[in-house]
Image: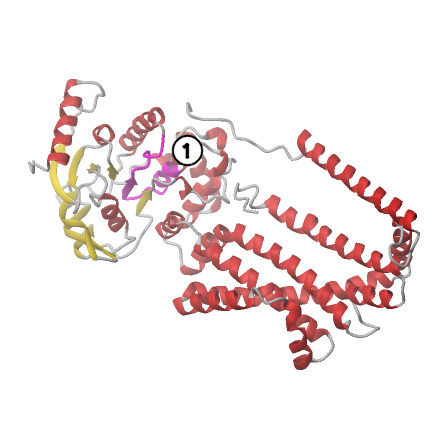
């Protein structure tokens, strides 16, 4: 064992990581202080409520159950649309991997639809599906489908020829070759696609809700923001925005970072 | 060390006259933009059980292409490749290849996981048996302390050791080695050549190597076939004796010179 070096386990809670967390907290505190001071100096709660007023509104709306309700409504639509889009993306990717025609079709469709903002499809969605959840689902699926399909496809294409030959050398069946070699090998790309898809879906959904809201009883977070603006409850508008940020952050940190740590970071295949 | 790992994979073929591998007038063309390019041209040879044959040649001699064809990864354009008299149609764990590239290990599995997975799939062993065998083989190549290490934490030499352990653990009838040490530093390469030779001799493995290192060819091979470049054709054949295998000896240097002459001068001297 002469050319053997000791493995390099990356300490998860190193001094550096702690220092970075500390810096972030300081930056956040400074920003909060600036907000609070500026809002007090401005003294116009219609334009910019203070941070404390925003937190007050956040607490009230949370305790009354309205905000959690709205958030759950949004998240329900979001997860449905997301799951639907990922399922379609899987089918598209499979077709693209299996044939040249499929590959070209996917390439063409993604380059056509990826630059098209989902919000721009809202008028069409309204025409086809009317006001309601189906329209929201339609734009959400559109926002997730193309980036995810693109990431999966390029993930499969990027699997190294050597790794493919190793899989074939072991005499794997077609199914095992796909599930045990190609999919894990493409996983870093797939995961970053899912991450991007999530961020797109969340943005698109909130924006779509803002534009036409669904209906008063079953509206989501976007609707919450919209109605509060109409009633000039600016602190509640900010409370709604804060909730959007917090949920986005929570999913990124709790779901995606956890998956990433357990997989691609452990495998040394961090891409993003 | 379990007894299973020590069994010689070639005990079955005691009939020395039937070659394990027959390469008959094989030609391989590559499609390019300017038309078909001939990578390998009319190459024939036979490989008997327990032999270690080295294909040596400059880049462009089609030696890796030929190895891929024997591995079953691509079909020859002309000629036939037979294992025990049967044409090769697809890759099989019976002919396990060790590649040059470090990314031949599955990055999502540990060293142990890589070898165990290959045994579970390639030899259809139970999980427990595969795990035991994988442990034994990794220990044997000096990686006993690194069973749970992921490939990205291992050095290049260690990655190749895992790949070699994986190939030997599968007990293939024919080991195919595609310049497995080419990307290593000179010291590590030399040490791994010696270790590989020891492993081959202990197991009595039949192996086909591809290399462009003359010293490597002499150290690991019992027989050397020299190929010319563009297109790859057989130029000469050398048998390596035990005294020629000693690094730094006069016999070693002389053989090295002979090989060099046949490869680069193209002076065909079929032995």
Query: Residue B87 is drawn in which quadrant?
Result: bottom left
Q: Foreground: B252 or A67?
A: A67
Q: Is residue B121 visible?
A: yes
- Residue at image position (17%, 46%) is B230
Query: Image height check: is B183 above or below A272?
Result: above
Q: How is the image coloured?
A: secondary structure
- Residue at image position (34%, 38%) is B168
Would you say residue B177 sits in the magenta stretch? yes
Q: Which residues are magenta?
A: B163-184
**In which quadrant is the N terminus of chain A drawn?**
top left
Q: Foreground: B134 or B185?
A: B185
- Residue at image position (33%, 26%) is B186
Name the residue that disc number 1 marks. B156
Tell me how many marks there are. 1
Would you say residue A245 sits in the magenta stretch? no
Q: Callout 1: residue from which chain?
A: B
Q: Position of residue B240 (x, y in %)?
A: 16, 29
Query: Residue A30 is drawn in which quadrant?
Result: top right
Left or right side of B52 for B131: right
Q: Position of residue A3 (x, y in %)?
A: 42, 25
Residue sticking out furthest to the top: B249
């Amino acid at each position: 064992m002469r050319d053997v070096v000791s493995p390099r386990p990356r300490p998860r809670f190193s001094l550096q990581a702690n220092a970075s967390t500390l810096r972030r907290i300081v930056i956040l505190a400074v920003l909060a202080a600036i907000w609070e001071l500026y809002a007090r100096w401005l003294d116009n709660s219609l334009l910019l409520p203070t941070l404390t007023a925003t937190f007050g509104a956040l607490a009230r709306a949370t305790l009354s159950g309205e905000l959690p309700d709205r958030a759950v409504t949004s998240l329900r639509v979001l997860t449905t649309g997301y799951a639907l889009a990922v399922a379609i993306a899987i089918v598209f990717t499979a077709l693209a991997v299996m044939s040249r025609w499929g590959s070209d079709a996917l390439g063409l469709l993604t380059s056509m639809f990826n630059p098209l903002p989902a919000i721009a499809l809202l008028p069409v969605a309204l025409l086809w599906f009317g006001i309601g959840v189906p329209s929201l689902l339609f734009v959400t699926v559109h926002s997730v489908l193309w980036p995810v399909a693109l990431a999966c496809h390029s993930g499969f294409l990027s699997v190294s020829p050597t790794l493919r030959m190793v899989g074939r050398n072991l005499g794997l069946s077609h199914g095992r070759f796909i599930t045990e070699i190609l999919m894990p090998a493409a996983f870093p790309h797939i995961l970053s696609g899912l991450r991007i898809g999530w961020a797109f879906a969340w943005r698109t959904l909130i924006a779509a809700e803002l534009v036409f809201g669904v209906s008063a009883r079953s509206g989501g977070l976007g609707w919450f923001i919209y109605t509060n603006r109409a009633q000039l409850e600016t602190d509640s508008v900010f409370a709604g925005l804060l909730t959007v940020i917090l949920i986005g952050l929570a999913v990124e940190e709790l779901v995606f970072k956890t998956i990433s740590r357990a997989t691609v970071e452990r495998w040394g295949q961090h891409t993003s | 060390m379990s007894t299973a790992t020590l069994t010689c994979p070639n005990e079955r073929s005691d009939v020395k006259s039937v070659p394990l591998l027959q390469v008959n007038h094989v030609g391989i063309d590559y499609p390019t933009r300017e038309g078909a390019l001939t990578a390998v041209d009319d190459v024939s040879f036979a490989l008997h059980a327990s032999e270690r044959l080295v294909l040596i040649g400059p880049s462009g001699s089609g030696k890796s292409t030929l190895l891929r064809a024997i591995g079953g990864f691509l079909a020859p354009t002309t000629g036939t490749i037979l294992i025990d008299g049967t044409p090769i149609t697809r890759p099989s764990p019976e002919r396990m290849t060790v590649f040059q590239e470090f990314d031949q290990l599955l990055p999502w599995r540990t060293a142990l996981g890589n070898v165990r997975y290959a045994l579970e799939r390639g030899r259809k062993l139970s999980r427990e048996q595969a795990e035991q065998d994988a442990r034994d083989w990794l220990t044997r190549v000096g990686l006993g302390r690194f069973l749970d290490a992921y490939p990205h934490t291992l050095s290049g030499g260690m990655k190749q050791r895992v790949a070699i352990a994986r190939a030997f653990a599968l007990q293939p009838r024919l080991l195919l080695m595609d310049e497995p040490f080419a990307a290593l530093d000179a010291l590590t390469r030399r040490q791994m050549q010696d270790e590989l030779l020891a492993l081959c001799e202990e197991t009595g493995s039949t192996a086909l190597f591809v290399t462009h290192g003359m010293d490597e060819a002499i150290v690991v091979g019992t027989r050397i076939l020299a190929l010319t470049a563009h297109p790859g054709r057989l130029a000469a054949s050398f048998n390596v004796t035990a005294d020629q295998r000693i690094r730094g000896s006069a016999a070693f240097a002389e053989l090295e010179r002979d090989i060099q002459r046949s490869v680069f001068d193209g002076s065909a001297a079929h032995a």
